[in-house]
Image: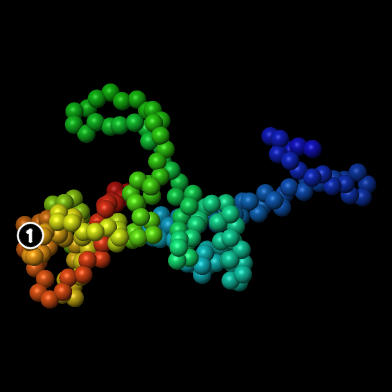
């Protein structure tokens, strides 16, 4: 038999002529699962990382590791989350695509109509190597001329080979910084994008942690 909208259910007959639909428990479980997925998605959006198993248990109200493991397995089966080669949780369909509704003129105003051109996952747009990418919050204004401001988030790919002209995250003589990389022969220097700061030339050690691939800024 079918329920409303063609949804299947099982009709059980009790004593007398009373009956009830057995799909109520399924609906409750699905609603609970949707709520838990929403919590995980909110955590990912706010923190820029996937929650740990213990954090998932806390959000879902699950005390036992076994229950959390079953939830994670279910989410993997649904392709909502995945695991990388090191076993760490990464978003699957949890990172929902966004509608692309055309283009906008940034010069002189022009007529525009809303048109669904495509859907686009921000992860797919911004991240080339998911397992090698991490996010940092910017402090300081030495890269303001490059459009990177305090409070912005930058995506960093640690597998890319840094080239002259790239913006990099580096440890210079024990201090971490974000600057333009400039190479000239054997000489290496790090350049700011703000005239208030001078170039940095490593005295003893330079470790490049990764190349900045994207900047994320929230206005509201």
Compare residues 142 and 118 and report the one nearer the observer: 118
Residue tagged by mark 1? 184
| Left or right: where 153 falls relative to 48 | left
Q: Position of residue 3 (x, y in %)?
A: 74, 38
Task: Look at the image and tell me whether residue 50 can be seen.
Answer: yes
| Left or right: where 216 falls relative to 87 | left
Residue 127, placed above or below residue 62: above
| Rendered image quadrant of residue 134 | bottom left
Q: Residue at x 16, y 51 (%)?
A: 146
Compare residues 94 and 207 and report the one nearer the observer: 207
| Rendered image quadrant of residue 130 | bottom left
- Name the outermost residue toward the front: 185
Q: Position of residue 153 (x, y in %)?
A: 28, 56
Residue 6, placed above or below residue 187: above
Q: Position of residue 218 (x, y in %)?
A: 30, 50
Q: Residue at x 14, y 56 (%)?
A: 164
| Left or right: where 5 falls relative to 194 | right
């Amino acid at each position: 038999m079918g329920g409303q909208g063609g949804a299947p259910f099982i009709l059980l007959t009790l004593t007398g002529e009373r009956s009830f639909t057995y799909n109520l428990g399924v609906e409750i479980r699905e609603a609970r699962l949707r709520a838990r997925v929403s919590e995980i998605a909110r955590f990912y959006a706010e923190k820029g990382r996937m929650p740990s198993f213990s954090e998932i248990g806390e959000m879902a109200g699950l005390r036992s590791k076994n229950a959390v493991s079953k939830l994670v397995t279910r989410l993997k089966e649904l392709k909502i989350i995945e695991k990388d080669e090191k076993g760490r949780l990464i978003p699957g369909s949890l990172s929902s695509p966004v509608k692309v509704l055309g283009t906008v003129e940034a010069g002189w105003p022009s007529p525009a109509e809303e048109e669904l051109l495509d859907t686009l996952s921000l992860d797919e747009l911004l991240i080339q190597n998911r397992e090698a990418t991490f996010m940092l919050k910017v402090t300081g204004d030495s890269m303001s001329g490059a459009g990177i401001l305090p409070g912005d988030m930058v995506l960093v790919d640690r597998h890319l080979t840094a080239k002259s002209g790239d913006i990099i995250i580096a440890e210079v003589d024990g201090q971490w910084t974000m600057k333009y990389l400039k190479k000239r022969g054997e000489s290496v220097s790090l350049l700011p994008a703000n005239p208030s700061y001078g170039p940095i030339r490593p005295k003893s050690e330079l470790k490049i942690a990764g190349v900045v691939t994207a900047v994320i800024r929230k206005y509201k």
